Amino acid sequence: MSLLFYPTPLLRDGLGMTLYAAFRIGHIWENITPYPEPLYQDHIFRGANDVPIFGRIALPDAPKGTIIATYGITGDLNNQWFLRALGRKGLGRQYGMVLFDWRAHGKTAELSPALTSDGLYEGEDFVCIASQAKQMGFPAPFWFVGYSLGGQLALWGIKTAQTLDSWGHNLGLEISDIGGGAVVCPNLDSNRSLKYLVRHPLGRYIERSIANKLKNLAWEIYQNYPDFIDPDAIERANSIWGFDQELVIGKLGFSTVEEYYQASSPLPLLPHLTKPTLILYAADDPMFDPSIIPDLQTGCQDNNFIKLMLTKFGGHVSYINSQKGKKLANDVDIWWAWNRVLDWIDSHSL
């Protein structure tokens, strides 16, 4: 697997790369992705505690496995173009594709008032989706994929799948059906990274933008399930921290946000993963505290199931390669991260 990531000089800055991807590439991605949009079918899965999960599915001829994937902290299946690019590329490589709106997002939020749990229930959601996809004819191995907070959820999915024998006897799914997972710039330690983000002037702007989107999600759930959420609590939820404080932790049984973040952060899981796992992580990611990187390396170093690709550049999730970098990596497009993910899954699907 090529490790080479060679962005243009102007994008060798994490914040610049992240903003460029969001405000430029996000508008032209369809024109620079070589595969067509899959002919998805809508499907409603049942997740942990029977919560309905909205998904879109596509199955190619002669599939060699199935990728189950979701996105980051906000958005939905319609506007998460980075996930849709994976859908195109994955189907083009003959993988069944299952993309889903995770809890409190998109159409899943219309189907249920269940709020986010940052992996504590979403890990089981991944496994339940794999079980139902198998029943529909999607083949193993199943690969759990996500980026940013979705990467956190996918790591929880891998960890949860490892204990399938103790809780999933009725799912019709074997531990051996789960191939493993691949994550791009996953959130690993919410306590550290959120504090880091709000200390930075531009980071505070990003945090405020995310918080506003979360608040809008809460209002949408309130419109459909007015008895489930206190509107006064939504009014008070003016930050990411506040959203979890006012709306999330009480329903999950936590007394503080710090306790919740500690319980849901996947960094402590890494030494205990026993399924093949690829982690792509950029040292210049502006969203996450750089002090996490040594702990990430330590958590992976003695675990032969983890392949850590720590790059100097890349920004948050973006990894937009230059034309020279595309040629050096022998890639068909500029999506360096997805090319590495799919190459790695290919290497474990032989």
Image (tube, helix red, strand yellow):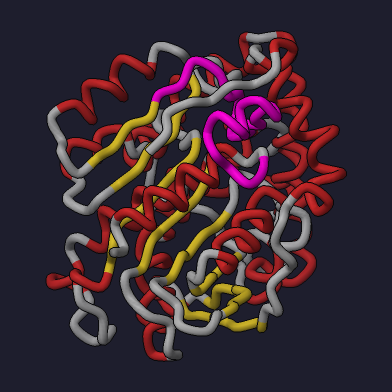
**Residue stretch rendered in magenta on the structure:** 310-333
Q: Residue furthest bottom?
A: 136
What predominant SS class does the magenta segment belong to? loop
Residue positioned 43% across, 82% down in the render: 138
- Based on the displayed image, in which of its 4 quarters is residue 349 positioned? bottom left
* Quarter of the image that includes the N terminus: top left
In the image, is 131 to the left or to the right of 313?
Answer: left
Residue 300 x/y as whole percent: 23, 30
Q: Nearer the viewer, residue 232 or 289?
A: 289
Residue 228 x/y as whole percent: 63, 65
- Based on the displayed image, in which of its 4 quarters is residue 241 positioned? top right
On whether residue 316 falls in the magenta region, the answer is yes
Q: Nearer the viewer, residue 160 or 185?
A: 185
Residue positioned 38% across, 43% down in the render: 254
Residue 22 x/y as whole percent: 77, 34
Can you say whether 121 is above or below 14 in the image?
Answer: below
Residue 77 x/y as whole percent: 70, 62
On whether residue 10 falls in the magenta region, the answer is no
Can you say whether 272 is above or below 20 in the image?
Answer: below
Residue positioned 42% across, 29% down in the render: 3
